[in-house]
Amino acid sequence: MLTVVAPVFHYHQFGEATRMARDSGLSALLTCGSALAVFATIRTFRREIESGTAEMALVHPVSRAGFFLAKTTGVGLAVLFFALIVGATMVTSVTGAAVGGHMAEKTGELARVWAPCVAAGLATLVLPLVIAAALNRFARYRFVLAAVRLALALSLLSVAVFSVLAGPHQLLRLLPPTLTLVSFVLFLVTIAASAAVRLRANAAVAATGAVVLAFLPFVGNYYLAEVLANGGALSWTYVAGATLALVPAVAAFLLLGVRLCREMD
């Protein structure tokens, strides 16, 4: 919602509508994505373990390593869906701000956000909730599942349409820093998963938070909003390097989680 609404208040932007939309989208990915990664991962593992579901699954010919990796991958995909929705909404919002700025330059008027992009962003927020509520009421379909699927479909559709109408420039500029940030958020999933195997929810959150604080000095290498200022761009070489730099840490926490899962009572 912040990503959609922020650039609309054009009287307070000092001509930086695109920057407001871009920064709010990347900030949402970092803050909300990190919170989702940590709490969803811990809740998933603790619910399975404390309810006895994990024990029932492991009675069957399912390896503990396979159980741990499957659960971690599942949460990672859920976080990835969230990142796709936020990232696609950000591209649409930034496109609307950029097109509105170009239109203002031609007419000499005050810069405004292009209305179709604002409408698409609001539709991505509102329509999934309304339709999911109707499906839940009349067809007993799961509300959250329907809302997430519809939001993902609408946000990706908006990106596809506006990339054709306004050109793929914004998508190509925003994709590299978004992927870099998503790789860091997915890394948090592995930290939380390894902590949740042996620790209860509150202790797992505290342990994950302690590890995140240790990695905090490196977050600036993944949150790269300033690189896009003044028409700047992020190279794919940097994206590949930043992602590969996380591989040893991801592997270490996955191995730790597998080991702890094998030792689990």
Image (spheres, rainbow, N blue to C red):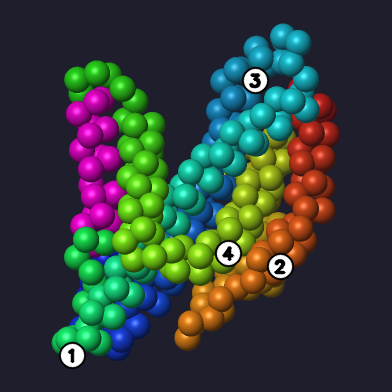
Q: Which mark is residue 176?
A: 4
Residue at mark 1 to residue at mark 2: CA–CA distance: 39 Å
- The residue under label 1 is 108
**Label 3 sits on what residue type?**
Ala
Q: Residue at x 82, y 47 (%)?
A: 252
Q: Is residue 89 visible?
A: no
For label 4, the SS is helix
For label 3, the SS is helix
Of circles 2 and 3, the one toward us is 2
**Label 2 sits on what residue type?**
Thr
Residue at mark 1 to residue at mark 3: CA–CA distance: 64 Å
Q: Residues within 10 Å of mark 4 (few under 14, many from 20)?
A: many
Say which quadrant the N terminus sits in.
bottom left
Tell me if residue 8 is in the magenta stretch.
Answer: no
Q: Which label's residue is closer to the chain start, 1 or 2? A: 1
Residue 136 position, x and y percent, is 25, 25
For label 1, the SS is loop
Q: Residue at x 69, y 45 (%)?
A: 190
Q: Which mark is residue 237?
A: 2
